[in-house]
Amino acid sequence: MRSQTLPGVTLVTLSVLMWSSVGIFVRHLQMDVWSMVAWRSLFAFITLVFVLLFCRNNRWFPQKVRLGWREIFSAVVMSLAMFCYIAALKATTVAGVMTIYATTPFITLGLGWLCLRERLTFRAAVCSLASLIGVCIMAGFSSNQGDLAGYFIAFLMAIGFAGSIVLAKKWPDINLPGVTAIACLICMVVCFMKSPADAPVPDLTEMLWLFAFSIATQSLSYLLYLGGSRFIPATLAGLIGQLDLLLAPLWVWMIFDETPPLSTLVGGAITFTAVITYLALEFIHASRVRGAP
């Protein structure tokens, strides 16, 4: 297993770097949110179906194709998170969305405690409270109605992603790539139905951007994370994943000069520190347990 740690870390890091590009695509593509999510989901669905049919049952991707009611239910929850993610990015700053997205581990802990009766530690409770304070600072000092709407949608996104994680824990044998493919299919169908009737069909250049969007943030990046995280501790994968919260706002600041307000920076710093502290403590604790005789 130790020989697979470096490839695992490499794959997870690459997937996080790809995820962090989401703001670039959302800002570059001048499309309504329904059309953007619909086309992104279409290309992601095609990619995932190809993987499910032709690339399964190897050492990085061992799951078999099996789609039952548990996978479908999980996909509905995941599709909500997928749509809300893009909708929130269209409504407010990338930094604001990433700040709320950072609370996903704590929402997951809360849902796990409610639904799975998992133990909630004192350090988790303290770090969760600190992250909540950061979000409240960010939202409380915002006077822009668009930002507040974006924060609310981002909160629904975080609940959706946390719910997907809890369901994966409840049903550890579900086919996660299959779930993601169904979620993309749901997003595609619903969003195409809701797209404006006069929405133009993307030209070839936009199609290429949308395809790259789906590969970087929805299909290939997810598969890389899934493959790499199998060979490293979950806490280490979580720590690497926090790079997304820093890089995503950095890219849009560098490329589009999108500077978040001071309240977002302060609240985001508090929330990010709380998440990193919690994951680092969990990683240290897990390392000590593994090293104990």
Image: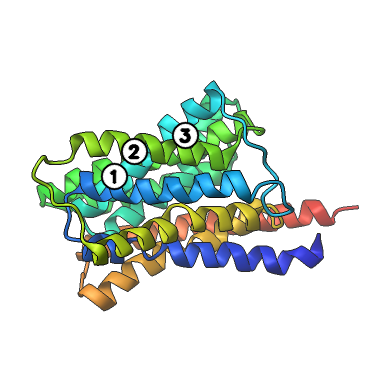
In the rendered image of this protein, does residue 114 appear above or below residue 179? above
Q: Is residue 151 visible?
A: yes
In percent of width and height, residue 43 lies at 38, 51
Nearest the eye: 221 or 237: 221
Give the class, few, some or many, for how many residues have Cα within 10 Å of label 2's Cα (few <14, many ≥20).
Answer: many
What amino acid is found at the position of numbered circle 2 in the picture? Cys
Is disc 2 placed on a helix, strand or loop?
helix
Considering only order in the chain, which callout, 1 or 3, is on the residue closer to the N terminus?
1
Is 222 situated left or right of 213 in this image? Answer: right
Is disc 3 placed on a helix, strand or loop?
helix
Colour pattern of the rendering:
rainbow
Is disc 1 placed on a helix, strand or loop?
helix
Q: CA distance from mark 3 to mark 2?
A: 17 Å
Considering only order in the chain, which callout, 2 or 3, is on the residue closer to the N terminus?
3
Q: Is residue 156 visible?
A: no
What amino acid is found at the position of numbered circle 3 in the picture? Gly
- Outermost residue on the right side: it is 293
In percent of width and height, residue 223 lies at 56, 53
Mark 3 sits on what residue? Answer: 163
Nearest the eye: 193 or 1: 193
Mark 1 sits on what residue? Answer: 38
Give the class, few, some or many, for how many residues have Cα within 10 Å of label 3's Cα (few <14, many ≥20).
Answer: many
In percent of width and height, residue 41 lies at 36, 46
Mark 2 sits on what residue? Answer: 187
Give the foreground label among 3 and 2. 2
User: Do the residues bearing badges 1 and 2 touch, measured as CB atoms within 8 Å?
Assistant: yes
- Outermost residue on the top side: it is 69
